[in-house]
Amino acid sequence: MKILVTGGLGFIGSNFILKLLGENKDLKIINVDAELSGSNKKNLSEIQDDPRYEFVKGNITNKRFMEETISKCDAVVNFAAESFVDRSINDANPFLVSNIRGAFTILDIITKQKKRMVQISTDEVFGSLSSDTATEESKFNPSSPYAATKAAAELLINSYYVTHDSDVITTRCTNNYGPRQFIEKLIPKIIILAKQGKKIPIYGKGTNIRDWIYVDDHCNGILLSLLDGKAGQSYNISGNNEMDNITIVKKILDIMGKSEDLIEFVEDRPGHDYRYSMNSNKISREMGWKSKTSFDHGIHNTIDWYLNHEEAWKDLTPSALNPTPWKN
């Protein structure tokens, strides 16, 4: 089986590729990545000479390029996306191009070529929740331009299933953490700034709540959905591990032996959702998936990885550590 992975130089995509090749000797991977923001070739340096792996630089909005590439594969897993919410506030256009137009390009091609597509989406399509938890049947209520583009892609995908009987599946995840995450995101930013003894910016009062899932657990859910998921269905994949931001910061500082004096509260992001929460009962019931990694175990692994792989992130632009990135 040959799988096309888009956005495979990014955080989740690279972990997914490493997992596939590490656990399945007969699988082959084509990785298409435009090498835009969030991509890092060093994420997959260890497999660059593996004969089962092929990297092709390209953009998923390029129809002719994608037609040719998809024709060589049995299925597509679409990780390619602009995903940093803060940057979508300042300029939403790249998010519309990649997250909607790019997803549509793949969708239209796999429908004509009769291939399977797994679209990677997000809990943010459901918007902020006060006390309940979202199921696959919950209504969309996106708050940010980023979340709106991911919701739009899901609606397109569902319409193609209904209209054209396309072999499409959508998975939604909660907040991922783990090795290889781009340093603009909360957890790697905390680790790196703490290592450097620099102030750690926390939006507002740090009370925003997210459900955290270790990236390997998420990848397990994606693989199950690819192999055993039902066409036209969506599957929520959550860590069942809700925690507010300030608790996470303090936990990381404690593990690293750093002072909480490094915490600096800064202006909150416009439209910052208070809480995300999703129910994963459907994928657990239908495919036996469950989150296996406790937050304590996962965060120790994550900290160790960043401290022991400085070469993977030290050359990345300092602007990624900007305390208020939506302003630039």
Image (cartoon, grey):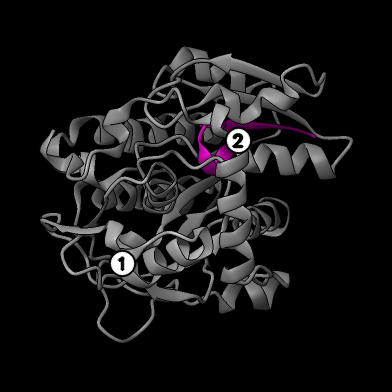
Quadrant of the image containing the N terminus: top right
Circle 1 sits on which residue?
A: 126
Residue 258 at what x, y percent from top left?
Answer: 42, 59
Q: Position of residue 111 (x, y in %)?
A: 53, 36
Q: Does the magenta stretch include residue 141?
A: no
Task: Please determine whether, in this image, residue 9 is positioned above or below residue 270.
Answer: above
Label 2 amino acid? His
Q: Where is residue 220 in the image (x, y as percent from the top left)?
A: 68, 57
Where disc 2 sits, the SS reads loop
Question: Going 65% across and 56% down the picture, which residue do you hit?
Answer: 225
Q: Is mark 1 on a helix, strand or loop?
A: helix
Residue pictured at 54% horizontal, 19% vertical: 67
Using residue 126 as the reference point, say whether residue 270 is left or right of it: left
Magenta range is 1-13
Which amino acid type corresponds to the residue marked 1 in the rendered image? Phe
Q: Check disc 2 and report the residue beneath it.
A: 309
Q: Looking at the image, is mark 1 or mark 2 earlier in the sequence? A: 1
In the foreground, 1 or 221: 221
Query: Which mark identifies residue 199?
Result: none
| Res. 70 image quadrant | top right
Question: Relative to the observer, which residue lies in front, 199 or 72?
Answer: 199
